[in-house]
Image (cartoon, rainbow, N blue to C red):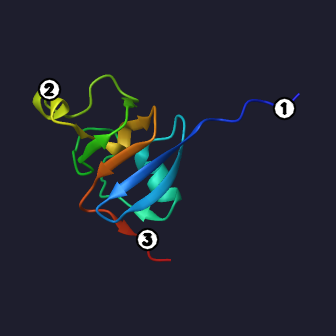
Amino acid sequence: MIADLPKIYQLTLLPGGWQLPVPAGHSLLQAALSAGVRLPSLCRNGSCRTCLARLDSGQIHYTIEWPGLLAEEKAEGWILPCVACADSDLVITAPGASALMG
């Protein structure tokens, strides 16, 4: 019997226009790095806010109870990709994103 494959969502990352796969349960930061795209990051635990980005469409959940965002920022669509996981296909705007040099 074949095991169920993990769900893969698509992340469109603006303004660069990258389209990246995001396996269920992986942070957006992990998925971007795996696909060769660097998002600004320092702490990777939701407290420093270096990776702050805007969720333009889609649904996420966090790996921690309350990331380092104000309630007003969450209401305006700001997210922290280092601790955010996809629950659907997503479009986010992350102005500091760049291709990794390889």
Disc 1 and disc 2 in contact, CB within 8 angstroms:
no
Viewer-nearest residue: 36 or 18: 18
Viewer-nearest residue: 61 or 92: 92
Above or below, 35 relative to 65: below
The residue singled out by tag 1 in the image is 2
The residue singled out by tag 2 in the image is 71
Residue 44 spot, x, y in % from top left: 35, 45
Residue type at tag 3: Leu
Above or below, 43 relative to 76: below
Which class describes the residues within 10 Å of circle 1: few (<14), some (14-19), or many (20+)?
few
The residue singled out by tag 3 in the image is 100
Q: Is residue 71 left or right of residue 88?
A: left
Q: Considering the numbered disc 3 on the image, is that residue within a helix, a strand or a loop?
A: loop
Identified at 73% across, 30% down, the residue is: 4
- Sequence-first disc among 3 and 1: 1
The disc at residue 30 is none
Identified at 40% across, 53% down, the residue is: 12
Identified at 64% across, 35% down, the residue is: 6
Residue type at tag 2: Ala
Mark nearest the camera among 3 and 1 is 1
Residue 96 spot, x, y in % from top left: 25, 62
